[in-house]
Amino acid sequence: MLKAQARFHPWAMLSPSLGLLLVFVLVPLALAAWQSFFAWDLLTPAVPVGLGNFRALAESGALLGTAGRTLAFSALVVSGATVTGLALALLLDRPGALFAWVRSSIFAAYVVSWVAVALLWLWLLDGDVGIVGVSLRAFGLPRVGFLTEPALVVPTLAAVTTWKIAGYAMIVFQAGLRAIPASVLEAAALDGASGFVRLRSMTLPLLAPTTAFVATTSLVVSFQAFDVIRIMTQGGPAHASELFVYAIYEQFFMNLSVGRASALAVVFFALLLALSAAELRAFELRGRTRRERSLP
Amino acid sequence: MTRSTKARLAAVLAVAVGALWVGPCVWMLVTSLKPLAEIVRDPTALPTSFTLSAYREVFALVPVARQTLVTVFVAATIACVQIALALPAGYALAKLRFRGRRVAWMLVLSCLLVPEQVTFVPVFLMLAKAGLVNTLAALIVPFAASAFGIFLVRQALDAVPDELIEAARLDGASEGVIVYRILAPLVAPTLVAFGLVSFVFHYNDYFWPLVMTTDDSVRTLPLGVALLREPGTGVRWHVVMAGSVVLSLPMLALFAALQKHLLRGTGGD
Amino acid sequence: MTAVDSYRTLHPRSDVVNYTRHIVPSRVNRRSLLLALSGAPLPLASSCASPERRERRVVTLWYSYGGKNREVLTELVARFNRSQGDILVEATYQGDYYEALAKLRTAVAARVAPTLSHVVVEVLPYLAETRALEPLDEYPGARELGLVHSLAQAGAFASGDARPLYGIPFNRSIPVTYLNSELFEAERLDAPTTWAELVEAARRLTRRSAANPRWGFGVPISWWFWVAMTAQAGGELVGPGGETTFGGEAGAKALAFLQRLVHDERVMRLPAGRDYNAWQVTNQDFIAGRVAMTWMSTAFLRYIEENARFRVRTAPLPGDVRRAVPTGGTFFVMLASAPEPEKRAAWSFLRFMCATDQAVDWATRTGYLPVTDASVARLRDGGFFAKHPNDTVAQRDLANVLAWPWAPNLFRSQRDVLEPRLEEAVMKGRNAGALLREARELARRPW
């Protein structure tokens, strides 16, 4: 920590960013919270309704349902991305053109647009003409409605999301793996530890910060899932894929209800804040214990 | 297991895994080249003839060149401005002691997880009052500051020893020089990685342009391609897939060109 | 020597040194790349000021359907633009009906609304009440358009002509039964005229096979078709006092009928997707021969006839207590926020679209109904209906059209309250009566 060279320096450096963040993130958030206490359709004057929007959402089960679905989806994506990313990093962190090429292909899926990925998987998973369904039926398996069975929709969307972000997770884990000094692992091998033991008791703990990073990023991505739902299922069938962000969009655009949408946004943000605070605290705790451990 | 068996097994698995990612993309390409009649007749068969008619349709229905230009311009501008603003902000939060530092940091953190779908209604109305709806400004300015960017820069600068900055100050460098000419190169991997992630994110952004644009003048490419999925009279999959290919090509080209930078930045090869 | 260099000398092994070694070569490249990107000059003007645009009055039209309809509309717009030199209509595609409607409302709120657009029937009362729409009665020739009564605002809404004119019919349709002629002939069946006959026909046509199943009947679980069934069962959407009743007993009966078809009779499979995706799936099923009979909009007639590999027959919807069909499709609307000269120019375009040539063109090339009496007459006299019996079916069934209530909360009831419950009821088999009671409660809320 250094002392600033002039009193105004820190604020001069921060004010453009803070100003923009205030105007375009925090103030709108506050405005959205304010709007949640009204019933408004943009074209007629707003009507104050107190907690009515929240009550309506809670009574219709929309609140609990959406929260539950979003958390389930998130859990699937975070665990999927973390495990897949690590597995891919371990498998493909080898020299050679083949491995480099496979790594690039996997990362390419991350780079392209959600629109392209959603359209592609919409086509592949189509119940009647999609190649996945046709192949399954060729093996004698029954017709599976990946996007039309309420129970299957969220796992399917989570799988598509994982497919897209696995490349990013893989690259991050690869960097993390490279950061582990080879000498440490070699010493363990010399001591007689098998590959699996090495992985579990040395590599994984050393990868903890990387894992935390991947988990946080996938959490953020999964909570913000919108494009894939809008293009593939529009929240259906029967609300089975209506996650928070999509629900907010629906309430505003389709139901003409700014108040209802804002109420959902408030709950969504509160949930996210709680989760991220927990994540940060867990990370800080881990960091603190690590630092404590490393002291002589 | 011997080393060579292990290597061979890894190679086999790698190919299988690669197929899982490459396969769908290949099928996307194949579908985009099939004529509509074939797709309707037997969607999963291999094509017997190739045609570029789907691509012709895409270019007829969507002003591709214009929309690509707009999208690239918007995404690039956002990324650059975000980096330019994140550096001093991250520096102030990481290195300078001042009253209100904790508050400022909390403010930045609290913005981290707010997606555009939560703020868009008030922002839209704000921009509408300023007469800026359906302009490039509406697509760029709301994203000019990135809490994530500031977060990353701060974390990166945390690792830089204070002595370096003290030494630079002793040399007579102003804070501006310190931030942009000395510290920026030091955290360049972070900046490049962040800049690329931001560029890709905003290039691919579908929701914000969906809300903020109303006609083709500033419409972005993801939006244009998504509109190809015209509901009602049967999805024309060959056109939709062709649109997806057209949408993905710029990003893939960028990726191919910058692969070295990006992977080096994250420690890859 | 700079401070950094001196630092490096003092701390040769530190991470900082390693960092800089990695990135120094590319520092210059990256900087210049960034600079180049941010400074890129772009010939972007948000209004392409072509000389043509500058001389003519511009009317913006936002439209919302793709495929064939889009082609025909853009052609008609081009024809209008060519036919005179004062007005230029710029048509922009905005997605499906609901997306476009959402954009329209937000655009009105942001004061960037277009001059013209078109909106679904059910939302017309709502938009009118918000004063977003321009009343059209006083525009030249408004009373002499010669619109088909049941398709115009006057006939489509209960006492629709007692109100100012807000919408000019554009693409209007009614639901009809589509039959796979060959399958019906093989089973020696005729088009059902009652619900009981429908069930019977569907039973005979359903073939349960793992590899190649066929369902006897298909209909999207959608508001429009449920309204048709409710009306056929004798119900009214809105009661005499203006309160939403959702058809009362008849509404529950209609919903229960759908559930029966799917779960008990098992002659109908659950259509996938929401909104128009569900309609699309139903169409694809029919064309592919997976479903022998569907209820679908007459709008898809051309598309289905062209893509099916069997002979397609249409028939009026069957009745229960009575015969009834709702109208669907959209009305052209003019936005009140547009400047006066633009509105006058837009009116010329609307009159152009109602002219017999265009009305005939639109109807014959799509499948939507001709909206003016003159165009109907021309088609009849020209033998079109004789040559296209399928088109005639819809034309004749106009006699059974059911008027929509002029209720501002009609659209909200549909989207927010009823449609989600329809899906739920059919997919999960919940009690129809209970769900509708719930819906009525919710519809009673003012917002």
Image: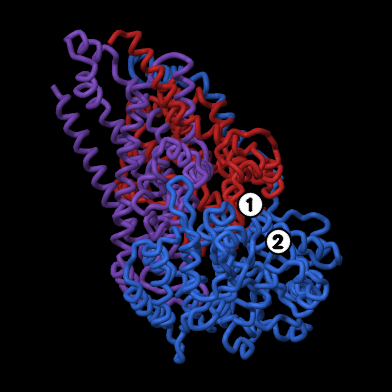
Q: In the figure, the red chain has which letter? A: B
The image quadrant that residue C138 belongs to is bottom right
Q: Is residue C248 left or right of residue A215?
A: right
Q: In the figure, the blue chain has which letter? A: C
Q: Which residue is mark 2?
A: C91
- Nearer to us in this view, C355 or A71: C355
SS label for mark 1: loop
Q: Is residue C132 visible?
A: yes
User: Which label belongs to residue B218?
Assistant: 1
Percent of width and height locating residue C368:
67, 68
Q: Is residue B93 left or right of residue A130?
A: left
CA neighbours of label 1 inside 10 A, class few (<14), some (14 to 19), many (20+)? many
Percent of width and height locating residue C164:
64, 86
Residue found at x 64% / y 46%: B67
SS label for mark 2: strand
Q: Chain of mark 2?
A: C
Residue found at x 61% / y 58%: C182
The colour scheme used to paint the residues is by chain
Residue found at x 78% / y 69%: C384
User: Which label belongs to residue A147?
Assistant: none
Percent of width and height locating residue C177:
58, 68
Q: Quadrant of the image for the C terminus of chain C? A: bottom left
- Nearer to us in this view, A115 or A48: A115
**Image vertical order of residue C240 relative to residue C329, above or below:** below
Q: Is residue A65 left or right of residue B137?
A: left
Q: Is residue A262 visible?
A: no
Q: Residue furthest left?
A: A296
Cβ atoms at labels 2 and 1 below 8 Å apart:
no
Kind of residue sitting beneath label 2: Ala
Q: Tell me the CA gap for discs 2 and 1.
A: 15 Å
**Image vertical order of residue A125 relative to residue B177, above or below:** below
Q: In the figure, the purple chain has which letter? A: A
